[in-house]
Image: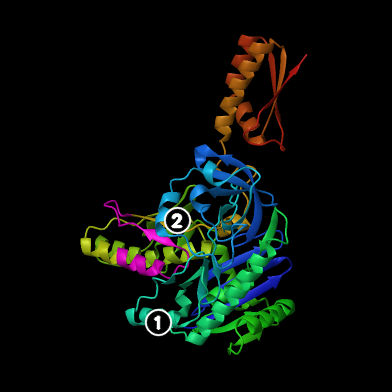
Amino acid sequence: MKREILISHDANEKRVAILEDQRLEEFYIERSDTHRMFGNIYKGKVKSVIPGMGAAFIDLGTKKDGFLYVTDALKSPLDLDAEFEESPVKTEEKRRERFKSIEEVLKVGQELIVQIVKEPIRNKGPRLTTHFSLPARFLVMIPGEEKVGVSRRIEDRHERDRIRQICRELEIPKGVGFIVRTAAEGKSAKELSRDIRYLIRLWKKIHASITEKRAPSLIHQELDLVERVIRDHLTDDTDKIVVDSNEMYKKVERFLGLYLPGQEIKFEFHRGEPLFEKYNIEKEIEKTFQKTVYLKSGGHIVIEQTEGLVAIDVNTGKFTGHKNLEETVYKTNMEACWEVARQLRLRDVGGIVIIDFIDMEKAEHRRNLFRSFKDAVRRDRAKTNILQMSELGLVEMTRQRVRPSLESAVYHSCPYCEGKGTVKSATTMAIQTIKDLRKTIGQSHSRIVNAYVHAEVAKRLLDQERKAIQHLEHTARSRIFIFSDPTIHMEDVNITIVK
């Protein structure tokens, strides 16, 4: 498999595309006017405590206050009076702490150190925790623990045992634990040791800066988009990194030298035509914002994003390739399951996801589809939880949401329909106008009334609804004038009384 990382920096926008065999698999975008907060550590101050929610609002010195649940606020390794070598809290103590109320844990005006685990989304502020994690390439440091865990995605038992043996032999300070990432599979003790030294230095730097800054303030900022992608996505099977900006090329080169010293990485500077145009992925990127995604067989999937969940519907469309319906449906579903998993990664959607696969009669087909879908989702770096397929052919799953989706980063809700996707028809608004006119005339007893409406509504009133207007004029003994206003919203009616 040929894997490439493309980095494009244009104006105030950074874009990163990850290709596998020249097919777009993951896409990220970051703009200078958006302030990414996930992973940042702040010295905050408790602004208010909400007992009914078991949570508190924390002033971070940012636009929105952070939200901290009581379960995320217990026994921080960065309590302001804690020492770096603090021993981890015993399991029995942790169990008792789970039942504490937020008022016992936090007081208004109290200062504490928190990390953002979920970006602000719409009107919600960032979600916080006092249980910190600091990622490197192969390891994630968990201060306050003394355990070493291995990613479940490393499935080979011998490899897991090998990694655990390496970790037992490495010098790990007291008061910190580690999670071994999937990227560590096959890596040497030297490479893991390098990550440990880097993370220990970073942790000590964070700890030292706490006393230097006043609350609210930023203590530690996570890496930017390009550096994060290199850290998390650069693997042994990556063929090359391509950058189209001279400034970004120097930045990536410097980061590779500091973060991955001595490692041979194919790194290119692209000149000439736009980078994404050369690799023919601009159209693929545009497709990630469309509701309908077409499959090679002729079928398609429809993706609807709402605030609470994402609904995905699978359809056979134009595909009629097999002799019987069951085989046609099975073929479409099998193709769709891989595309659905890919679209979830590309669009970076999160929360509850419902996939409505086409009904299949054979239990074997349903089992094969579910296994294939789980295999497809396994490549996703976000945490997922998939429930068994229901009798209706629905697959329910959750996908970790730590930031707004790709669509939210690029699009705003339409100011005309306010995100509904539909507006009232001219017929509906014509009828509504007549009702409003009747109410206004009844309340004012005016002889002359003007109604300013959208052009299409005015046309409807003056043509199909003319008799209704005339009848209202006769019964109310008033004159009604309809005016077309091209600047008025389809759903607005402006009625004025002429005295």
Q: Which residue is mark 2?
A: 302
Identify residue type, mark 1: Gln
| Residue 40 in picture, x, y percent from top left | 62, 61
Say which residue appears at 62% left-offset and 16% top-offset. Answer: 439
Q: Is residue 51 magenta?
A: no
Which stretch is magenta?
Answer: 370-394
Q: Nearer the viewer, residue 72 or 185?
A: 72
Mark 2 vs mark 1, CA separation in Å: 48 Å
**Colouring:** rainbow
Horizontal relation, residue 409 to residue 400: left or right: right
Amino acid type at circle 2 is: Val
Q: Residues within 10 Å of mark 1 (few under 14, many from 20)?
A: few
Q: Does residue 182 sit above or below 60 in this rendering?
A: below
Can residue 344 be seen here?
yes
Is 265 situated above or below 9? Answer: below
| Foreground pick, 308 / 50 | 50
Q: Residues within 10 Å of mark 2 (few under 14, many from 20)?
A: some
Residue 277 is left or right of residue 310, and the answer is right
- Residue sitting at x 48%, y 66%: 145
Identity of the residue drawn at 73% across and 15% down: 448
| Residue behind mark 1 | 165
* Location of residue 12 in the rendering, given as x and y in whole percent from the top left corner: 73, 65
Using residue 146 as the reference point, say whether residue 62 is left or right of it: right
SS class of the residue under badge 1?
Answer: helix
Query: Does 387 appear in magenta?
Result: yes
